[in-house]
Image (cartoon, helix red, strand yellow):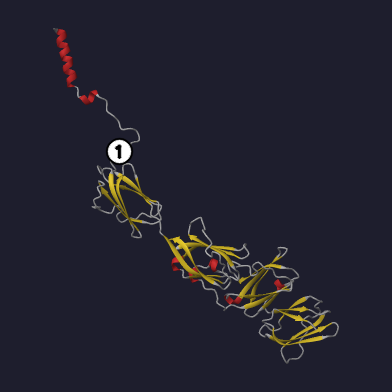
Amino acid sequence: MNAVRLLLSALAVLAAIPAAAQAPQRSAPSGQPSRDAAQVAVRNEGEITLYELYIARGGTGARNWGPDRLGDRVLEAGREITLRLGQNFGCLADLRLVYEDGAEEIRERVDLCRERIIIAARVLPMEERSFTVRNRTGLMVIQLFGRSMGEQDWGPDRLGNDVLEDGAEMTISIPSRGCEIDLMVVYVDNRAVEERRGIDACDLAELTLAPGWLYAENPAAFRPGNGAGPRITLINRSGRTVFTVHVFPDGAPDEGPDRLGADTLSDGATLDLALDPAPDCRYTVRVTYHDSAREERRGIDFCRQTELAIAPGWVDTFMGSVRFINAGAVPVIALHLGEPGAPLAPDALGAGTIGRGEAATIILPDPKVCTYEVRAFFRDGRTIRIPPTDLCTAAEIVLSP
């Protein structure tokens, strides 16, 4: 009887234990997200600022968007923020993204419990930026490339099968996202390449390629002189072949293009150039010879001096002086520079002479006077007289009986 009572008591105790205590609890599999999106990250991986973001709970497609979740903030390209949605928000939501350019993007039934990051990825639309290119470099442009700023690929040559001769112009189109573009110009010698980045093509109606455009603060406003600069002649009397010639305003950040292009300047040859205006009309001439030797002369006033001889010692010639070259068969033993009608002036050579084929630099007697009459006496007794000449604009005077 006692055994029966004990058995009944044990059964009663077991019946009193809750079923939940008898069966072990199941835990959520490791890594499975919670089925509630209390917060979500928003990242802008595109190129356009995100201005507004609406998140409608439930993902039913209903357009009751509620407030802008960004509030008074915007999300610029490359930035990320975290938004709190509140407890018991659930997982499914409809999204509305509004960008700076006014474009809208709707995403329905987005599972925010799985997609913990909302990615905004709107890129700038590709547009054709068209403008006129004028070539005033002194060189033929054989290729011209353009791209949206920051891209790696230059794409096709925008000139196609054409070239852009010096003085010519052509309208080109550059596909770009946004306003800023990069340009690369290749000249005829295939060595000269100029590249300019970050040009605002939205404000660009025309672009003039000329010495200085590469460093102009605003390429759209860059206007080189249109025939207002001096025209000069360079004469090679160096006895060597000149491989490159650069003529540019004193103090310019760049020497500009090689004025010879693919050519060279042999001894005795001349080179005619049209220059753009320079402050105070002062220019630098830089030449490289066939043996890679380089010479440079600065401060040349090409508004007064229209010719320049590249010859031994030419870099030492300064303003207010003239080079006299003896082209005769014997030395020049006396040289007189006097004002027209005045008595014979003192011998400018003093005790010196100008040997056959040699040159001498003579300082003008009066820096305020430019017009002089020149008389030269040779060792063989012959004399030459050069009528009144403006020596302020003369690079050199050739003495030949």
The residue at 54%/64% (across/down) is 160
Q: Is residue 54 visible?
A: yes
Q: Is residue 6 shown above or below 360?
A: above
Residue sitting at x 31%, y 33%: 28
Quadrant into which the C terminus falls: bottom right
Viewer-closest of 320 and 328: 328
Q: Quadrant of the N terminus?
A: top left
Q: With 32 as the anchor, is 326 left or right in this view?
A: right
**Above or below: residue 367 compared with residue 32:** below
In which quadrant of the rendered view does residue 326 lie? Answer: bottom right
- Percent coordinates x, y for residue 111 in the rendering: 30, 44
Residue 178 appears in the figure: no
Q: Quadrant of residue 356?
A: bottom right
Tell which residue pokes out farthest to the front in this image: 161
**In front here: 163 or 240?**
163
Determine whether 89 is above or below 287 in the image: above
Q: Which residue is mark 1?
A: 34
Comparing 348 with 129, the one in front is 129
Total number of numbered labels? 1
Q: Answer few, some or many: residues within 10 Å of disc 1's Cα (few below 14, many 20 plus, some between 14 and 19).
A: few
Q: In the rendered structure, which amino acid carries the disc numbered 1?
A: Ser
